[in-house]
Amino acid sequence: MNTSTRSHLQDLAIFGNAPAFAEKVHVGRPNFGNRERLLSRINDMLDRNWLTNDGPYVREFEKRLAEFLGVRHCVAMCNATISLEIAIRALGLTGEVIVPSFTFVATAHSLQWQEITPVFCDIDPKTHNLDPLQVEKMITPRTSGIIGVHTWGRACDIGALEEIARRRKLELMFDAAHAFGCSYKGKLIGGFGRCEVFSFHATKFFNTFEGGAVLTNEGELAEKMRLMRNFGFSGYDNVIYIGTNGKMTEVCAAMGLTSLESVEHFVEVNRRNHLIYGRELEGIPGISLMAYDAGERANYQYLILEINELEAGLTRDEFVTVLAAENVLARRYFFPGCHRMEPYRSYFPHSALMLPETERLCRRVMALPTGTGVDQEAITRICQIIATAVSNAPAVKARLAESSSRGTAA
Ligand code: T4K
């Protein structure tokens, strides 16, 4: 039997067929630049015997990033979570800070870690980003700032958030973890608000193994963050701020410099994959592929589907199970929402009432594999699984219910 065809109900792995993919297909498989260039950089690093602490690769990486993004200062760090923590502290945020709940939990944790309360605000269901009208409602006398998240790389309504921040005298910064290479009104993200934070984690389309950076046009702020990432040292023996260890290593910067040389290629592959998914999924009831604004630059790194259960006949979770049986590990980012994770669930047990759109989206969204590890044939096969499941939704649903009542994975 040809295990790769999934056009009939009985072809599906939940009915006992072999999985469509022999190996697991992941969301977030890393992209690599030129291996020889990376290894030669690592060799040079070893010859130099300089491994971390503001080394030459980190400096070069910061310079290249700032140039690429058109922002004055770049402070590279060990990851985006520490970058967020340092930026939050350097801006002097206190009390309460407004953030979306529909984000990776690091956005909220970077506040709570320093005993600042993340106040979860609802999103606009069309953009998946902070809804400025709701932001306004969440402001209290304790609010010191707003952190917008450019979810999936699609920019927040920056103009509206800037206007609120100005009028209500709040600090504004952005978690741009997803948004490297994306634009807002034609300008690359990186220079908006007081500062913006990027993630270069292995699962990001542009990675430094682990890594992050804060970009800002403010020299004093950049300098403060530079010291804070190195325990607050200003020269030997002289500590002038509370600080932490947020330094990027040389090997990470070497990876970053190498990734940067291929970044346009990674975007092109993601864009091509997005087009293929769009074509293959077209017309399947209840399945919508999240679009990127054709008038802006995008990195297309997240392949996001929204499932309308009534039209598709299956829930998002049922699709995740069907795909997992085929070795396709779709992800439920950012289920169940930060407000339903600890410690926030205990601190604010009723916050779901204020977050109807977040709640709805958390039940509907599914991320599918893309990036350089996924080719046209794999995408066609993944989409065929989805199409076959939808056209046979009642039987699929019954099969999944039967497996779950038997306590077996479908
Ligand atoms: N703000 C936002 C909005 C974020 O999305 C994130 C991170 C942050 C802040 C914080 O950034 P960092 O501090 O991480 O720089 C992943 C990533 O760990 C996380 O960086 C990312 N967002 C989030 C959206 O996704 P998980 O728990 O889903 O990742 P994980 O480890 O399950 O990896 C996903 C898949 O990727 C795996 O199934 C296998 C594959 N994989 C992963 C790694 C690490 C590989 O094939 N190779 C690898 O080396 O969180």
Image: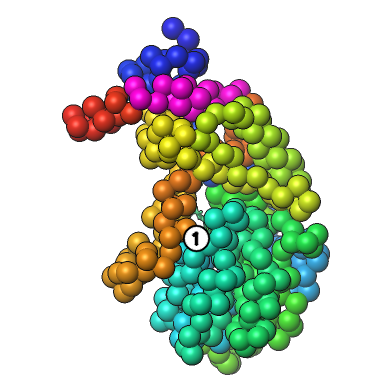
Q: Is residue 125 visible?
A: yes
Q: Pinpoint residue 285: horizontal percent, then vertical percent.
A: 52, 31
Badge 1 density bin: few <14, some 14–19, many ≥20, Cα 10 Å = many
The boundaries of the magenta stretch are: 377-395
What residue is drawn where x is 54% and y is 55%? 125
51 left or right of 61?
Answer: left
Q: Which of the 4 quarters of the picture holds residue 183? A: bottom right
Main SS of the magenta segment? helix
What residue is drawn where x is 40% and y is 26%? 393
Q: Is residue 283 above or below residue 46?
A: above
Q: Is residue 391 magenta?
A: yes
Q: Is residue 219 magenta?
A: no
Name the residue furthest top: 1
The chosen color scheme is rainbow
Q: Which of the 4 quarters of the picture holds residue 201? A: bottom right
Name the residue furthest left: 406
What residue is drawn where x is 31% and y is 74%? 347
Task: Report if the beta carbon of the residue with label 1 is closer than 8 angstroms to ligand 1.
Answer: yes
Q: Which of the 4 quarters of the picture holds residue 198? A: bottom right
Q: Is residue 378 visible?
A: no
Instruction: Report the amino acid beneath label 1.
Output: Thr
Q: Pinpoint residue 102: horizontal percent, then vertical percent.
A: 48, 60
Q: Pinpoint residue 337: horizontal percent, then vertical percent.
A: 41, 59
* Residue named by callout 1: 103
